[in-house]
Amino acid sequence: MAGSGALCALVLAASAALAAHRLLSPASPDAPEVLFVVSPGETLADVARSLEREGLVRNAAAVEWLARLRNLAAQLRAGEYVLSAALAPNEILTRIAEGRVKTYELVVPEGFTLAQIAQRLGAAGLVDEAAFLSVARDPETATAIGVEGETLEGYLFPETYRIPRGLPAEAVARSLVAEFFEVWRQIEPLAQAQGLSMRDTVTLASIVEKETGDPRERPLIAAVFRNRLGRGMRLETDPAVIYGIPDFDGNLRRRDLEDTDNPYNTYRNFGLPPGPIASPGAGALRAVVEPADTDYLYFVSRNDGTHTFSRSYREHVLAVNKYQRSRSR
């Protein structure tokens, strides 16, 4: 009888092992990938039931048992996951516990403003636009992250990012500013040696970025502005004026250039504007601390993305007559 009991126990154990193996094998070996969402606050039991309901696993109870065996009950992370019923439940649990969430590409072009970046984030469904604007324009955020200024304007670095949905607005902002600091650390010694603060460097670089059509001209344009600042001349740059006009309609008028109430009006105010007007890229930041060795003081567009540079006002007027006034006739 004893031998019979032992044999029966072995049979039961083998049957249980076979059942567990089946329940924890892929639910459908040829299944396609699908998007599976773990919502904040969901328990292990919630996740297991959702996995079974969506056909990603064979049995919720078996998945829950496996997760507890692996001590994963408290480690499952919220987010979007690309999963398939062709995956074993063990692999599915690993991906969710490690937070291997689906990410989306976000391209931040050079010269985008804070508002444009917020709009792009919102349009992609990555972060609520209003929430991002609130965080990025909060002086406490700028202080906490460590940038100079009252907002994150200019510090949301132009780059291609991979961002998951569901991150808090501040977390997304921090990831973009972190890329700025990677570049800033490389040029900070040059800026400090020239008496340029972080804020001044970024502000001037943002103007260079907005004025540049051909990247090769960045050092020349930076040189013009630095030369003008050094001589106590006004910068007289249209992009800065435009930045300070609420709801700009695309038409820069003479009265805009004469507006003394616009703090960004570099035709009326001396020195740099109050802060950055856009996010400069690495090339524009580098150009500010390594400007071309030239005494140019003016430039005018050739209407093809490049500029003609002049050392004197007389030369500049001739260039304006050639490339701009003749164009309006």
Image: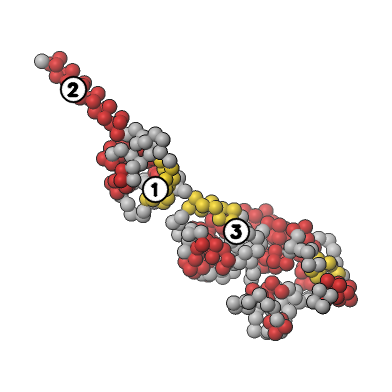
Tag 3–tag 1 contact (CB < 8 Å): no
**Which is nearer the N-term, disc 3 or disc 2?**
2
Image position, residue 44 (x, y; %):
31, 46
Image position, residue 96 (x, y; %):
40, 44
Three-letter amino acid code of the residue under disc 1: Phe
- Above or below, 229 against 13 in this view is below
Three-letter amino acid code of the residue under disc 3: Val
Q: How far is disc 3 from disc 1 in space, using C-alphas?
A: 28 Å
Q: How far is disc 1 from disc 2 in space, using C-alphas?
A: 40 Å
Q: Which residue carries the number 3 mark?
A: 108
**Which is nearer the N-term, disc 3 or disc 1?**
1
Residue 308 seen in the current view: yes
Q: Is residue 272 left or right of residue 34?
A: right
Tag 3–tag 2 contact (CB < 8 Å): no
Q: Nearer the viewer, residue 131 or 87?
A: 87
| Residue depicted at 86% across the width and 72% down the height | 322
Q: Nearer the viewer, residue 125 or 192?
A: 125
